[in-house]
Image (tube, rainbow, N blue to C red):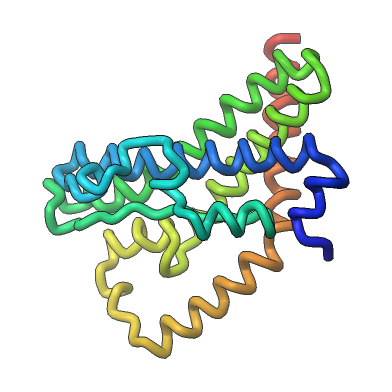
Amino acid sequence: MDLFITYLFKSPQLFFTWLLVVVFSICCHEFMHAWIALKQGDPTAADAGHLTLNPLRQMGTMSLIMLAICGIAWGAVPVRPQLMRRRHSDALVSFAGPATNLVLFFVFSVLFYFLGGLGEAALLLFKLGALLNMVLFIFNMLPIPGFDGFSILSSFFPRLREFNSEWMTGIYFIMFFLIFFSFEYLWLAADFLLDLLLYGMQLVFG
């Protein structure tokens, strides 16, 4: 399998569109974590400068380098649930990121339906935006340690946080394989959901 960076020469439009969509989507995801955390009483991420869409702050240099080379990236914001006002505030903060990706899925889908005819560049941008954000939503909602889905679940079932180090090592090993071997299936699922939404919009708008 070729490294993603080879698309810089094989298909520059795809390369730069992918970079734009990934960076924008991850930065929006992390921004909402930070903003909701602040609203719930935890200023940790805000004080660390995460109320921004700056990819250097939200993703970091290594993540951006990996994005350019391999096509994958990540982001993170620091939070302290003990500072939050309500019992399940941390679940709300965790869900804020994936929920943002879900909203972006609908936004990009609508743009794809109504403005995709503007040209190949618009078609590619809006379709990639929709598909990637649905993949991010599904992926981040997986109930696996380190993912938002696990943080949400453990907010309601605190004993899940009591994993020992051997469990955590095994789980992170599973996460590694999930990232590299489930992406194609997540993409197919996202493509199906996009087609379903577009069909629904066609029935409504003609």
Farthest residue to the right: give it. Answer: 10
Please state the horizontal and vertical placement of residue 9, each as a whole percent of the image.
Answer: 84, 46
Q: Is residue 35 left or right of residue 130?
A: left
For residue 14, above or below residue 181: above
Please state the horizontal and vertical placement of residue 70, each as a whole percent of the image.
Answer: 68, 59
Q: Residue at x 53, y 46 (%)?
A: 137
Does residue 179 appear anywhere in the picture?
A: yes
Quadrant (top left, top right, bottom left, bottom right) of the C terminus? top right
Does residue 99 appear anywhere in the picture?
A: no
Residue 29 or residue 1, whichever sits in front = 1
The tally of labels here is: 0
Please state the horizontal and vertical placement of residue 84, each as a whole percent of the image.
Answer: 15, 49
Quadrant hosting residue 71: bottom right
Q: Is residue 84 left or right of residue 179?
A: left
Q: Residue at x 82, y 24 (%)?
A: 120
For residue 162, above or below residue 7: below
Quadrant hosting residue 202: top right
Please state the horizontal and vertical placement of residue 69, each as a whole percent of the image.
Answer: 68, 57
For residue 117, above or below residue 137: above
Quadrant (top left, top right, bottom left, bottom right) of the N terminus? bottom right
Q: Residue at x 68, y 28 (%)?
A: 126
